[in-house]
């Protein structure tokens, strides 16, 4: 499935209630987890100490930070949709966000996105995207919620 291309508010309107797309998988390697730990100063052993995690963790592995999983949302979203004719786009908020299960080091995740609602706020498109971040070969989602973006078209 290729990228959905949006050039106007009207293009967005046609997608309300529909699944917009599915991203490629991204692997969460120990290196990526360590870099995120460095960036956020969250060096809890469950994320960065593979030897200790093998023994003491109920997962027998290090796990990705939940916020690392969430922070990949823009990258995964950009694989699904291309929005043209923009002055800017703003992350407006998150609703009903829930972590379903941890992502073990080495697992891969992908995004599934559906345009839940679209509101015209005096020329600004407020898009509410129902999303799920899936873990490859796992029945339970890593993360689900509604991302809210404001699109300022030219």
Image (cartoon, grey):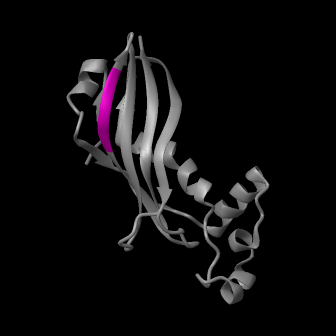
Q: Is 115 part of what is drawn in magenta? A: yes
Residue shown at the point (46%, 42%) measured from the top left: 95
Residue shown at the point (57%, 48%) measured from the top left: 71
Front in this rendered view, residue 81 or 91: 91
**Relative to 64, 43 lies left or right:** right
Return the x and y of residue 98 as percentages of the image width and height.
Answer: 48, 56
Instruction: Kindly indicate the quadrant of the structure image that contains residue 121.
Output: top left
Q: Residue furthest bottom?
A: 55
**Relative to 152, 54 lies left or right:** right
Image quarter (top left, top right, bottom left or bottom right) of the C terminus: top left
Prevailing secondary structure of the magenta residues: strand
Return the x and y of residue 136 as percentages of the image width and height.
Answer: 40, 69
- Total marks shown come to 0
**Relative to 52, 150 lies left or right:** left
Q: Is 82 part of what is drawn in magenta? A: no
In the rendered image of this protein, does residue 83 appear above or below residue 45? above
**Relative to 46, 151 lies left or right:** left
Q: Is residue 25 visible?
A: no
Q: Is residue 109 visible?
A: yes
Return the x and y of residue 102 as percentages of the image width and height.
Answer: 54, 69
Residue shown at the point (30%, 38%) measured from the top left: 116
Return the x and y of residue 38 as percentages of the image width and height.
Answer: 77, 56
In the rendered image of this protein, does residue 125 appear above or below residue 63? above
Front in this rendered view, residue 81 or 54: 54
In the rendered image of this protein, does residue 79 appear above or below residue 5? below
Residue extent of the magenta highlight: 114-119
């Amino acid at each position: 499935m290729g990228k959905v291309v949006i050039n106007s508010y009207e293009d967005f309107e046609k997608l309300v209630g529909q699944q917009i797309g599915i991203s490629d998988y991204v692997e969460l390697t120990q290196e990526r987890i360590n870099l995120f730990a460095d960036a956020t100063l969250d060096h809890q052993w469950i994320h960065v100490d593979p030897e200790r995690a093998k023994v003491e963790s109920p997962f027998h592995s290090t796990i990705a930070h939940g916020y690392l999983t969430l922070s990949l949302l823009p990258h995964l979203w950009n694989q699904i949709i291309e929005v043209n004719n923009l002055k800017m786009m703003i992350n407006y908020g998150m609703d009903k966000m829930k972590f379903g299960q941890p992502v073990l080091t080495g697992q891969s995740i992908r995004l599934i996105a559906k345009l839940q609602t679209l509101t015209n706020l005096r020329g600004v498109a407020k898009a509410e995207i129902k999303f799920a971040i899936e873990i490859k070969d796992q029945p339970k989602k890593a993360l689900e919620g509604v991302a809210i973006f404001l699109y300022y078209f030219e």
